[in-house]
Image (tube, helix red, strand yellow):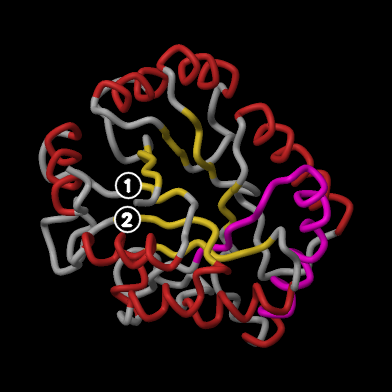
Amino acid sequence: MPNISICIEMLFTEVDFEDRPAAAAKAGFGAVEFWGTRNKDVDALQAACEEAGVKVASFAALGGQELVRPQPADALQQAMASEVEIARALGVRTVIVTVGNELRELSRQEQFGNIVANLSSVAPVAGAAGVRLAVEPLNTLVDHVGYFLDSSEEGLRIVEEVASPAVGLLYDVYHMQIMEGNLIATIRRNVDAIYHVHIGDVPGRHEPGTGEINYANVLRALDEAGYDGWCGMEFSPSDSSAAALDKARRACGLA
């Protein structure tokens, strides 16, 4: 079955951030991920992960960069170089990239072109360091109204047009169930382009087993399709984090 990581932005929030890797380890999980580095003491987090014996699976890079806008290549590449340095220090192979909210002053075609151009600019920086970028579509019906990229189809077109092995898709099962469904067929058809997966149930974005998604089937489909990346548990627990993760483990067929 795919490797599981724990998003410590949403889970184990009852303890301080640097204590969350140890909480994840105590719950039986060997990897964590988080949303970004700008407000983090990365050195302290790295030490906490090493002490707890857990890996860092991923984090969100280029926070605050609106890829829907034209960006100066030098500045964007410098920002990516800084993220790559952190990724290498933490042993992270794949970082998460969001594209920003839709702009009224530009057409969707222009914004799509800007995303492709910006990712094409930074892809060589990441690729040279052995780091991959996972571009994330989000749902715009519940959680992220106004976000530009809200379908796997358009995300995959971005990946295709960038045409770099350093750029792939983050397939967030929660977001894509809301926007389009057809989860397993999409996974099977596009597994080679999927670089990271996120897990949460619908409705409510709680742990698997609380809603409508059959996660045992979804994870089995990922496994059978040959996916070998991380699946990040990124949900708001309906109970304590430990209890919610126990329920998630059972619902995902991991227990």
Residue 113, picture quadrant: bottom right
* Residue 196, magenta (yes or no): no
Residue at 65% x, 76% y: name it: 158
Is the C-beta separation of discs 1 and 2 under 8 Å? yes
Check disc 1 and report its element: helix, strand or loop.
Answer: strand
Q: Is residue 194 left or right of residue 144?
A: right
Coordinates of residue 217 in the picture (x, y in percent): 23, 66
Q: 118 or 211: nearer the eye?
A: 211
Read off the magenta span. Answer: 112-136
Q: Is residue 185 left or right of residue 73?
A: left
Residue at 40% x, 65% y: name it: 144
The answer to whether residue 27 is above or below residue 218 is above
Which quarter shows the C terminus? top left
Looking at the rendered structure, which numbered label has been put on residue 233?
1
Residue 20, picture quadrant: top left
* Residue 124, magenta (yes or no): yes
Magenta stretch: helix, strand or loop mostly: helix
Looking at the rendered structure, which numbered label has been put on residue 199?
2
The answer to whether residue 17 is above or below residue 136 is above
Separation of disc 1 and disc 2 at Cα? 5 Å
